[in-house]
Amino acid sequence: MHLRVFLKLESIPRLLLPYILDRGESFGSIPSSVGDGGRKLVVDFSSPNITSEFQGKHLRSTIIGAFVARLYEDKGWDVTRMTYLGDWGKPIALLYVGWGRFGSEDAYQADPVGHLLDVYHKIGEAFQPEQAATKEVRDKAVKEGRDEAEVQLEMESLESQGIFAERNEAFKKLEEGDEALVAFWKKVRDAVIADYQRFYDRLGIRFDEYSGESEVKSETMHEVEQILKDKRLSEESAGAWMVDMTKLGARAGHAIIRDRGGSSTYLLRDLAAVLERSRKYSFDKMIYVVASDNNIHFNQMLKILEAVDQDLAKKLQHVKFNDASKMAATLGKGYKPEAILDRCEEAMSSLPEVDTDKAAVVGNSDIVVKGLGTSALLLQELSTRSASAHAFDTKTLPSFKLGSGPDLQYWYTKLATLLADHTATAALSDEDFEVLADDDHANMLRILAQYPEVVNATFHSLEPSGIVTYLASVTEQLADCLNEEEGEISVTPGLAALLEATRIVLRNGMKLLGLVPIPDLPQERADTPVAG
Ligand code: ARG
């Protein structure tokens, strides 16, 4: 329900200013004692795969996922942040085979993750012709409509040689708990996690749990398989266990639970993980922030779960986004996640050329440049709608355009400077309130008053771009308010109160997006003049 209230211009500041100033940091959020207070949310996000590069889709999931977590927290939910690493399966076994050929302990000591990626690419190249050969056989068989069992045999014979055989053998050993393989796997996992952690730290993101495909217990997987068998949902076919999705209302498809080699699949692990998490966290809701290349997987998983436990299935939500990204091409082979942030920070060096005055206001100390780099990246990510391709583009990052990270930081810093010598209060004289009754100021307050509604709408759409557009309109109106006082801006008590309310909204919005306002950064900002 919407209540439209028409107010006389003069009454707006008298009502809204104290309302916003009193609430301060909590303006726009809900105390945990009311509303959804105390309900439990698990967010599964970021979730990279430990043998390969941190892809664009993982960056996007990291940023959107952290946003969703903060949004729910603002609504009073009790949020568990979890990343589900792709840390099990044949790629690790392939890396092990690669390590045997190309691995060097010295190179590893010097740069663990860089060397592992290098080894993975080398073995990948060597493996490529074999993979192409099996793909050709399969494609041809499908075209010719050959007998499935016959094709299976041919595939098996191809996979019983070369790197295929070595990889499958290694994976089998890993699953059986072979000491050397498990030690190798653990070494890789630990090195990669340490590397991710540095990256997440720089972005200001923390996880309550580094879970992963490897951590799903085999008992839970057996439990899921038993339920599926009992409910006659799964069947055996050519040695594999699968669910005929047409029986669950899908138009086509088979979902493989256990492959013909007896290994558990991504699907079985994820299904079992739902049970484990539900027991561990008793969540009211679980959100997966995962790219749309996982759509089939999540559709199958949700359909199967619905057939098994409807109440549990209802608690799950897949928040998807376009998986296309040019990030890998921009960064080149073998990059580590921190390189993403390094490139963004480097790009900030051209900010003074873009706008000398604004660049001088934000400053250029190391810590400020780092803050600007992440702000620019976050805003580029969060202003892109989920259905659009990933926007990663370091060329357009150094910008003060409306709604960009650097521009939000500029306006916030400017407000902090203007308010440095003023204590804002809403206990104003009639005269002070009169100053605020003109159009620009009254409109500013109207916009500020919309903030809780904007947050609310975003909570339902989970599209961060709504908040970005809104914050851009706040800075646009702020520019109008300040411009009107030509030259030196005189901060009257009335204006101070309005600017303070603006600062509150900007800060709350920026924090929701994951930005640390520059004046709040840990170190003093250096006052070196900006060149150019
Ligand atoms: N590692 C997967 C990928 O890179 C994403 C995992 C998402 N989470 C999950 N529970 N399936 O596509």
Image (spheres, helix red, strand yellow):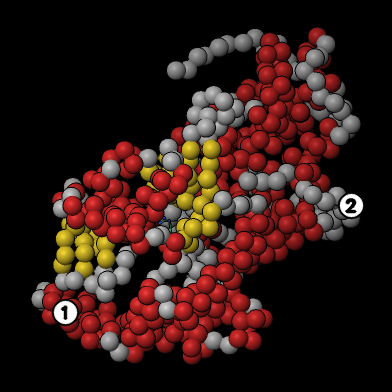
Residue 221 occupies which quadrant of the picture? bottom left
Q: Residue at x 27, y 66 (%)?
A: 258
Q: Name the residue carrying label 2.
A: 527
The answer to whether residue 22 is above or below residue 159 is: above
Residue 411: percent from the left, percent from the top?
Answer: 74, 40
Q: In the rendered structure, which disc, 2 or 1, sits on the residue that comes first in sequence?
A: 1
Q: Amino acid at mark 1?
A: Val
Q: Is residue 427 left or right of residue 267?
A: right
Q: Amino acid at mark 2?
A: Asp
Q: Secondary structure at mark 1?
A: helix
Residue 496 occupies which quadrant of the picture? top right
Q: Nearer the viewer, mark 2 or mark 1?
A: 1
Q: Is residue 435 left or right of residue 335?
A: right
Q: Residue at x 59, y 63 (%)?
A: 196
Q: Residue at x 55, y 32 (%)?
A: 76
Q: Nearer the viewer, residue 237 or 296?
A: 237
Q: Name the residue carrying label 1.
A: 151
Q: Which quadrant, please, contains the N terminus?
A: top left
Q: Is residue 264 visible?
A: yes
Q: Is residue 325 visible?
A: no
Q: Secondary structure at mark 2?
A: loop
Q: Is residue 83 left or right of residue 352?
A: left
Q: Nearer the viewer, residue 478 or 62?
A: 62
- Neighbours of disc 2 within 10 Å: few (<14), some (14-19), many (20+): few
Q: Which quadrant, please, contains the C terminus?
A: bottom right
